[in-house]
């Protein structure tokens, strides 16, 4: 059994189709060994998902902090939305569902927020100031807003309206498969969605993640956006790494999303 070390934690990323986990070395934000994946149970009820998380964890010889990333809003440990998982999750405590199944203290958060934390700490957003938007294109569209290295959790901008529809139903990676779109057709939708975001929030950078970022050459060059775009560096492991990081930070008493060494402020806000 791996004994508790402050710089090692376990991340579990719950997705609409798969649940992945692995041990993360937080000094570099890298997996120690392979990750392990099981299909997300269908229906993805709280009990079935918690049992699958237990199986993912049991695949490893690890006891210590566990971070669990979930594809919906998570407020104070409780799930508030469930666009791509069973609706029974709504108002269920993810924290309470996971705690009896995992051998260590549990920290829970939104999956895109986990990816955002990982990219801001170890990946494409490392050390950057200003507003960065991490967009994960997968079963849904996940968004992480990171401002001066600090996460603003639970931004649900994947559900903005696009052409009269919920944006993720048009521009998620799953929409490309469902609608049998060519890369060009899908990239047009993704680009339109990103334009909508950039017109509303004027970020300094988009970091593009999710499983689809494994093949960036197919679609990233087709995007027509004003904002600089980079591909996520942790790609498919960002959720695992970010969840593990959140778990480790929670052990150190660091509030979710706070940069470990706060970015220096360049502006002073005076309130009269
Ligand atoms: C959910 C988000 C989640 C995203 C990616 C969306 O449908 O509303 O909370 O981050 O999918 O999984």
Image (cartoon, rainbow, N blue to C red):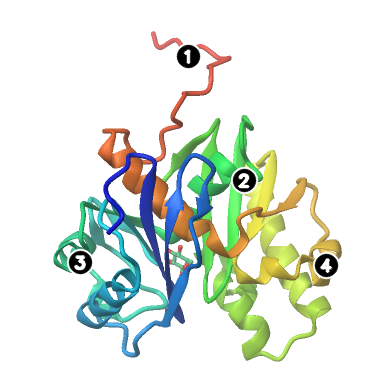
| CA neighbours of label 2 inside 10 A, class few (<14), some (14 to 19), many (20+) | many
> Percent position (x, y) of residue 137?
60, 68
Q: CA distance from mark 2 to mark 3?
A: 33 Å
Give the number of the disc on residue 123. 2
Up-down relation of residue 176 to residue 200 (above or below): below
Query: On the picture, is 113 further left or further right than 231?
Result: left
Q: CA distance from mark 4 to mark 3?
A: 40 Å
Quadrant of picture, ligand 1:
bottom left
Residue name at image x 41 percent, y 81 percent: 38
Residue name at image x 74 percent, y 86 percent: 181
Q: Is mark 3 within 8 Å of ligand 1?
A: no
> Percent position (x, y) of residue 269?
47, 14
Contact, CB < 8 Å: mark 1 with mark 2?
A: no
Label 3 sits on residue: 91
> Percent position (x, y) of residue 252?
29, 34
Query: On the picture, is 99 further left or further right than 150?
Result: left
Label 1 sits on residue: 269
Q: Nearer the viewer, mark 4 or mark 3?
A: 4
Give the number of the disc on residue 217. 4
Q: Nearer the viewer, mark 1 or mark 3?
A: 3
User: In terms of sequence position, does the residue under pointer 1 or pointer 3 come before the other?
Assistant: 3
User: In terms of sequence position, does the residue under pointer 2 or pointer 3 come before the other?
Assistant: 3
Secondary structure state at the residue bearing disc 1:
loop
């Amino acid at each position: 059994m791996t004994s508790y070390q402050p710089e090692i934690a376990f991340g579990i990323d719950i997705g609409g189709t798969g649940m992945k986990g692995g041990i993360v070395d937080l000094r570099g934000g890298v997996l120690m060994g392979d990750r392990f994946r099981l299909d997300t149970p269908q229906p993805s009820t709280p009990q079935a998902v918690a049992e699958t998380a237990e199986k993912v964890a049991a695949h490893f010889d690890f006891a210590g902090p566990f971070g669990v990333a979930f594809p919906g809003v998570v407020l104070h440990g409780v799930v508030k939305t469930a666009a791509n998982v069973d609706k029974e999750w709504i108002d269920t405590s993810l924290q309470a569902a996971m705690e009896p199944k995992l051998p260590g203290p549990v920290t829970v958060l939104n999956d895109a927020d986990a990816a955002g934390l990982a990219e801001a700490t170890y990946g494409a957003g490392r050390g950057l100031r200003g507003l960065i938007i991490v967009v994960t294109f997968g079963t849904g569209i996940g968004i992480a807003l990171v401002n001066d290295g600090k996460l603003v959790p639970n931004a649900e901008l994947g559900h903005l309206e696009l052409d009269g529809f919920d944006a993720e139903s048009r521009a998620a990676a799953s929409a490309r498969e469902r609608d049998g779109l060519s890369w060009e057709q899908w990239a047009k939708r993704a680009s339109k969605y990103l334009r909508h975001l950039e017109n509303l929030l004027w970020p300094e950078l988009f970091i593009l993640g999710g499983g689809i970022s494994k093949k960036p050459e197919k679609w990233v060059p087709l995007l027509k956006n004003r904002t600089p775009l980079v591909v996520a560096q942790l790609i498919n492991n960002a959720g695992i790494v970010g969840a593990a990081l959140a778990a480790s930070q929670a052990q150190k008493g660091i509030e979710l999303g706070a940069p470990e060494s706060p970015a220096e402020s360049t502006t002073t806000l005076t309130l009269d």
